[in-house]
């Protein structure tokens, strides 16, 4: 699914480029247009295998790569748990590089529907590392966190969070 | 946008269930870009990493935001209109809409009176806004007429040769009926 998506996007991008190259005169304006179009036609998708996520707690890890999305055929979304492998870590932390951990997705660039019919989306993909029972490994959480977590019973993460979106 | 359609069905279903359980507070927000009201079930919200929430009424506003356009420079937004004096800004009727974050103790009479007041205040505000726009537009017709007359006087030679006008003075202005005819003629010729 990701592969077909990527190929579709690249095809669209290339055709756009071709069309724009013909119409626009200035090189600067052309590059600006393509940047704008890239922004607008970006399709945000699920968090799946090989998705790199930012870690927003003080457990010691910095970047984590998803290796499995528990629950969900197409991938994980906001509020779901994933199994991930630590790719980048701070030198002295509870978690070292290469370790396989569980994580709860606290920010997702893909929009998620709320029960009142509206949708929320965040700026990036971020995760909070948890243990098998669902208790966070770290003691602080940075950045905003959605209140979808309350429904998923991740109350501890909500209590550690600075802002609740 | 695939997984989304199944999600929305689920959402609608669970909404009916959840609505009975949770006491959901309905709040009418404003679109960040165009300042139109956001009713429940409409729009999207984007949460930035500094925890600032941007609410949009539709994808048009959202796309403009993604293009990093400044709403104060985009002509059709309320922000532009208020900034450039096209819509009323300072009025007593707006004072009533100020949001207070302190909770009010429930009083049935207060609630009833507030609901009645909302209706009348809204009416007053709308009539005042219409008046503001009318006031802004007064004298526009007269001004247009004056400008058209002036243009005719100066540039009639583009339409009719001055030799013809000298021979037949009845063709020159300024009889009111004749002016409107000449106006139409001049416009047609110019186009």
Image: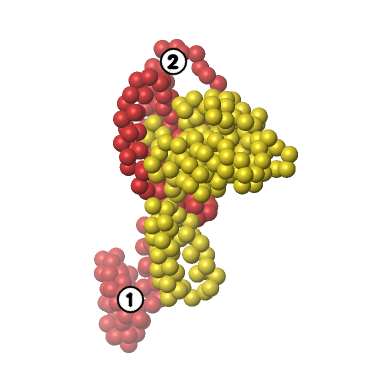
Cα–Cα gap, marks 1 and 2: 64 Å
Tell me where residue A77 appears, x and y as whole percent. 45, 40
Q: Give the chain coloured yellow.
A: A
- Callout 2: 10 Å neighbours few (<14), some, many (20+)? few
Picture quadrant of residue B185: bottom left
Above or below residue A55? Residue B185 is below
Residue B119, which numbered label?
A: none
Tell me where residue B39 appears, x and y as whole percent. 38, 35
* Chain B on-screen colour: red
Picture residue at 62% right of the left edge, 31% below the top: A137
Residue farthest toward the bottom in the current orientation of the protein: B163
| Callouts 1 and 2 on one subunit | yes
The first of marks 1 and 2 along the sequence is 2
Picture residue at 34% right of the left edge, 28% below the top: B14
Picture residue at 44% right of the left edge, 48% below the top: A45
Tell me where residue B137 appears, x and y as whole percent. 41, 51
For this rendering, which residue is in front, B77 or B6? B6
Picture quadrant of residue A158: top right
For this rendering, which residue is in front, A122 or B38? A122
Residue that carries the numbered disc 2 in the rendered image = B110
Q: Is residue B12 visible?
A: yes
What chain does mark 2 sit on?
B
Residue that carries the numbered disc 1 in the rendered image = B190
For this rendering, which residue is in front, B91 or A31? A31
């Amino acid at each position: 699914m990701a592969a077909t998506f990527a190929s579709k996007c690249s095809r669209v991008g290339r055709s756009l480029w071709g069309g724009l190259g013909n119409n626009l005169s200035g090189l600067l304006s052309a590059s600006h247009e393509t940047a704008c179009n890239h922004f607008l036609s970006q399709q945000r998708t699920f968090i799946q295998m090989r998705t790199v996520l930012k870690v927003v707690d003080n457990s010691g890890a910095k970047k984590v790569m998803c290796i499995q999305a528990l629950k969900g055929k197409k991938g994980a979304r906001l509020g779901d748990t994933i199994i991930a492998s630590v790719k980048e870590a701070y030198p002295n932390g509870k978690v070292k590089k290469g370790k396989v951990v569980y994580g709860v997705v606290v920010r997702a660039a893909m929009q998620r529907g709320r029960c009142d019919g509206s949708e929320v989306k965040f700026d990036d993909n971020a995760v909070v590392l948890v243990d098998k029972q669902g208790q966070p490994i770290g003691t602080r959480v940075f950045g905003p966190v959605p209140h979808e977590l309350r429904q998923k019973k991740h109350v501890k993460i909500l209590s550690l969070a600075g802002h609740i979106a | 946008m695939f997984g989304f359609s199944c999600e929305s069905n689920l959402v609608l279903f669970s909404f009916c269930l959840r609505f009975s359980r949770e006491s959901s507070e309905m709040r009418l927000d404003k679109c960040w870009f165009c300042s139109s009201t956001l009713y429940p079930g409409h729009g999207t919200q984007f949460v930035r990493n500094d925890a600032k929430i941007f609410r949009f009424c539709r994808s048009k506003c959202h796309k403009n935001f993604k293009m990093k356009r400044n709403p104060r420079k985009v002509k059709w937004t309320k922000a532009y209109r208020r900034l450039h004096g096209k819509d009323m800004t300072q009025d007593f009727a707006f004072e009533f809409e100020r949001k207070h974050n302190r909770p009010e103790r429930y009083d049935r009479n207060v609630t009833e009176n507030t609901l009645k007041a909302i209706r009348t205040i809204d009416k007053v505000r709308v009539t005042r806004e219409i008046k503001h726009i009318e006031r802004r537009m007064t004298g526009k017709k007269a001004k247009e007429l004056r400008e058209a007359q002036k243009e005719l006087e100066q540039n009639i030679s583009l339409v009719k040769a001055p030799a013809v006008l000298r021979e037949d003075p009845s063709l020159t202005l300024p009889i009111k009926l004749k002016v409107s005819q000449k106006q139409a003629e001049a416009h047609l010729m110019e186009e």
